[in-house]
Image (cartoon, rainbow, N blue to C red):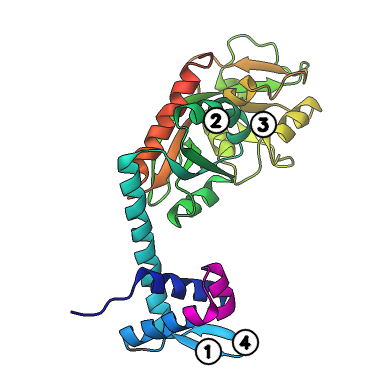
Amino acid sequence: MTQLPTLRQLQFIIALAEHGSFSRAAEAVFVTQPTLSAAIKELEAILGTVLVERGARGAVLTPAGDVVLERAQRVMTEAEDLVVAAQAAGEPLSGPFRLGVIPTIAPFLLPRVLPALRTEFPDLELFLREDLTDRLFEALRERRIDAALIALPYDAPLIESHAVWSDEFLFAAPPDHPLAKKANLAPDDLTDEPLLLLEDGHCLRDHALAACSTGSARSDFAATSLHTLVHMVKSGLGATLLPRMAVDAGLVDRMGLEVLAFDPPVSGREIGVAWRKGSARADEAIQLGEAIRAVLEHPAD
């Protein structure tokens, strides 16, 4: 029978590639340098090829080492998924769960749902990461997070999603704005209204423009956050569209702005949970999304 590398040996070659030296790699995986060095030599003997060039300045993988590294990372990922799948089958949403959240959702949704999630899933250790959608999708594909709360629609390769909540857009403007007191406001009313929006990279910008297809964005101003955006509106620089979730969370409280809902049909965005296609935690991601939906549907419970 062919002798196979151990998972421990594969872990060591991955650590060596990441840290570039035997001493730092050994420290990262909590073994002594001689132990790690011996394991790498044994791996080289099993595979019949040199994987590492050892020198005074550190360790560099050979071309054969690069090939082994790629496969080792794949094997370790599958092994980790095996453990996660087994644990999830026994007790879903327990232990560590790494959740990404986009900035236009995190500060307005998390304070509402985290206490309920802690109560419903007392053994869940939720680790949160706030970032833009593209970077969260990259983290999903690289298995650095398990799921992400995002705004839909948003197409991305190798990513699947499940809609959780509809979040309508509201019109916000200073009290002296021509549309501030308008009854029966419709998206078409914004045809000649360049809107203040978030800067490129925020999916809310694209969703807002899609909601008022006849409107446009001001090219001379762009905010980095919703809090900055409402202060720009308060300063009289223009009007904007805000998600109801943020308004309900108090984003415009005491700002002196006029906030109007559009007549039906209402435009907005969908809040959803996303995960890597084929992830062992897909069912848990959906379960987490449904738990969040329950909180939003019964906020007073």
Q: CA distance from mark 1 to mark 2?
A: 49 Å
Q: CA distance from mark 4 to mark 1?
A: 8 Å
On the image, numbered disc 4 is attached to which residue? 57
Q: Quadrant of the N terminus?
A: bottom left
Q: Secondary structure at mark 4?
A: loop
Q: Secondary structure at mark 1?
A: strand
Q: CA distance from mark 2 to mark 3?
A: 33 Å
Dominant SS type (magenta) = helix
The type of residue carrying mark 4 is: Arg
Q: CA distance from mark 3 to mark 1?
A: 59 Å
Horizontal and vertical percent position of residue 195: 67, 31
Residue drawn at 53 percent across, 72 percent down = 18
Q: Earlier in the sequence, mark 3 or mark 1?
A: 1
Task: Classify 10 Å Cα crowding around label 2: few (below 14), some (14-19), many (20 and above).
Answer: some
The type of residue carrying mark 2 is: Leu
Identify whether 24 is placed above or below 292: below
Residue occupying the far left of the picture: 1
Residue occupying the far right of the picture: 235
Disc on res. 114:
2
Identify whether 235 is placed above or below 102: above
Q: Is residue 42 visible?
A: yes
On the image, numbered disc 3 is attached to which residue? 195
